[in-house]
Image (spheres, rainbow, N blue to C red):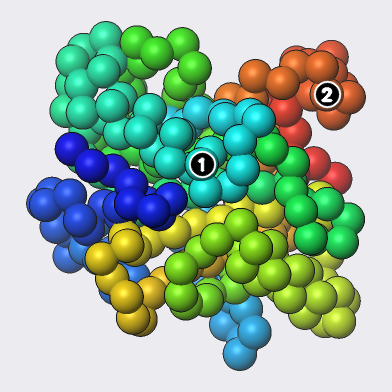
């Protein structure tokens, strides 16, 4: 099955899976991580997400589009049965990618962690992956600032949107975690208009930083100084959203 086209992901809605009725419209009827909308402005939202299980993998040494395609392929194989139980797991949305930008938001580290939210059926216990580069992570709850944007998400456009969100938060004197953000994609390449993408920046005036720590434990880059500090504290190995 084709899972990418011209470096763009096929979204959950392209996979012909059962639809749910209790998710936001931009989730296309599929399961999304539950959240509470705390604030909604013309520039951004503030959302509180519940703790949840995710499955993810880290791709190093590739650019944004290539890394997401490689990661998506691995994760799609996992939910298609490449796990110890040979279980078929329904696709969810969004596909989330953790990005570490440069100080000027012009480039990003070639180290991307990509993850799928696991559906409710597997929130209690998820089958172990057969691929040792895939991890199941129990991510604690997180509060994030969210900027919505349209079009096709590329490495350049995602960095631009995240930089704009950071500027808006700075102007509004909001407290947030610098140095990393999340790109969330909901639509596949077949959808040409009214596309829904998001960038998330962690709010640090809440007890939510551990979400990034847990998700980043999927990273294979254990020599990073931040990872070493977290390992010493017996937390996650690669930390994106720490104070």
Q: Position of residue 82 (x, y in %)?
A: 26, 18
Q: Secondary structure at mark 1?
A: helix
In the image, residue 84 sits, relative to residue 164, either above or below, namely: above
Q: Position of residue 102 (x, y in %)?
A: 83, 52
Quadrant containing the C terminus is top right
Q: Which mark is residue 177?
A: none
- Residue indicated by mark 2: 224
Q: Quadrant of the N terminus?
A: top left
| Label 1 crowd (10 A; few <14 / some 14-19 / many >=20) | some
Lower sequence index among marks 2 and 1: 1
Q: Determine whether, in the image, residue 42 is placed left or right of residue 230.
A: left
| 85 vs 76: above or below | above
* Whether label 2 touches label 1, CB < 8 Å: no
Residue at point 69%, 70% (across, down): 160
SS class of the residue under badge 2?
loop
- Residue 20 visible from this viewpoint: yes
Left or right: residue 185 compared with residue 29: right
Left or right: residue 233 versus residue 2 is: right
- Name which residue lies at 49% across and 17% down: 133
Q: Is residue 19 shown left or right of residue 134? A: left
Which residue carries the number 1 mark? Answer: 66
Q: Residue at x 51, y 41 (%)?
A: 66
Q: Which residue is depicted at the point 46% across and 68% down?
A: 152
């Amino acid at each position: 099955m084709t899972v990418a086209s011209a470096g763009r992901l096929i979204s959950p809605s392209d996979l012909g899976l059962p639809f749910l009725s209790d998710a936001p419209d931009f989730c296309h009827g599929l399961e999304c991580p539950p959240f509470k909308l705390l604030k909604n402005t013309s520039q951004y939202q503030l959302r509180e997400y519940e703790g949840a299980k995710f499955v993810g993998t880290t791709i190093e040494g590739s650019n944004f589009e290539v890394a997401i395609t490689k990661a998506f392929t691995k994760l799609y194989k996992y939910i298609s049965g490449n796990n110890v139980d040979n279980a078929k797991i329904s696709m969810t949305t969004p596909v989330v990618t953790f990005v570490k930008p440069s100080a000027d938001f012009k480039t990003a580290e070639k180290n991307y962690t990509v993850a799928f939210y696991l559906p409710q059926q597997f929130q209690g216990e998820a089958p172990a992956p057969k691929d040792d580069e895939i991890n199941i992570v129990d991510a604690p709850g997180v509060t994030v600032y969210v900027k919505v944007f349209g079009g096709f998400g590329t490495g350049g456009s995602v960095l631009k949107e995240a930089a704009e969100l950071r500027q808006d938060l700075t102007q509004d004197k909001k407290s947030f975690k610098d140095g990393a953000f999340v790109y969330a994609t909901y639509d596949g390449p077949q959808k040409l208009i009214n596309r829904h993408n998001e960038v998330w920046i962690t709010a640090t005036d809440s007890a939510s930083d551990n979400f990034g720590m847990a998700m980043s434990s999927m990273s294979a880059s254990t020599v990073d100084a931040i990872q070493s500090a977290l390992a010493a504290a017996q937390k996650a190995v690669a930390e994106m959203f720490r104070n």
